Amino acid sequence: MEKSTEISSRFWNLPQKPIEEFNRESNFIDDIIQKAHIEKNILSNLDGIKTVFDGGAGYGRFSILLAKQGMQVTHFDISKPMIKKAMEIAEKEGVSKNITFMNGNLENLEKFSTNQFDMVISFDSPISYTYPNQNKVILDLIRESPPKSPKTN
């Protein structure tokens, strides 16, 4: 097992992590602002998007948001407790049928096909939790999604 996988798995599988992460947006202004900005940008780029891969999806903030928009989302995370929390929230929000929950490591994305998803999102996990393999992880994430044409005005 890669050292980064061992560390990430141990950290994110702590029993308190799902509730801590869920509550961050109530307690930290930087998280509130950053996630609101990301959410706004995601929602403004959904033309033609039907399938989404959310890597390092945590408790499901963006997976659930996208499922509410009718997307089919693959929620992928290293932490079983985080996935459990995301499943609870998705069920409560009535969107669990739009989400496939998968436990896995961003350093092992070979099971996913090239261009399998219309959109791939992954926030901070490739950089923060896959060192020294972050370049491979980012290339694998890019590989999963077809290149998108730039918007024209």
Image (spheres, grey):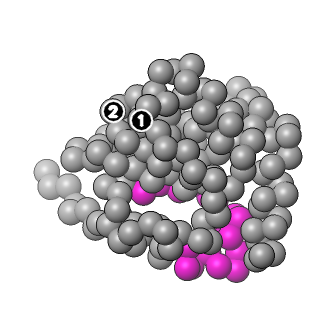
Residue 98 disc label: 1
Measured as percent of width and height from the top left, residue 21 is found at 73, 38
SS category of the residue bearing label 1: helix
The crowding category of the residue bearing disc 1, from other C-alpha atoms within 10 Å (few below 14, some 14 to 19, many at least 20), is: many
The answer to whether residue 142 is magenta is no
Other residues around mark 2 within 10 Å, as few (<14) / some (14–19) / many (≥20): some
- The residue that appears at 49% across and 69% down in the rendered structure is 111
Q: Secondary structure at mark 2?
A: loop
* Left or right relative to 104: residue 91: left
| Viewer-closest of 112 and 66 | 112
Where residue 88 sits, quadrant-wise, is top right
Query: As drawn, which residue projects farthest toward the left?
Result: 153
Q: Quadrant of the N terminus?
A: bottom right
Visible residue check, residue 20: yes
Find the distance from the CA under tag 1 to the CA under tag 2. Answer: 7 Å
Going by the image, does 79 lie left or right of 137? right
Q: Kindly identify which residue carries mark 2.
A: 70
**Tag 1–tag 2 contact (CB < 8 Å):** yes
Tell me what residue is drawn at x 50 percent, y 73 percent: 110
- Write the start and end of the magenta stretch as one range: 120-138
The image position of residue 118, as x and y in percent, is 31, 55
Labels 1 and 2: the sequence-earlier one: 2
Placement of 13 over or under 70, stated as above or below: below
Q: Residue at x 86, y 46 (%)?
A: 14
The front one of 124 and 85 is: 85
For badge 1, the amino acid type reads Asn
Query: From where the camera sits, is residue 40 visible?
Result: no
The amino acid on which the numbered mark 2 sits, given as a three-letter code, is Gly
- From the viewer's perspective, is the residue at label 1 or at label 2 nearer? 1
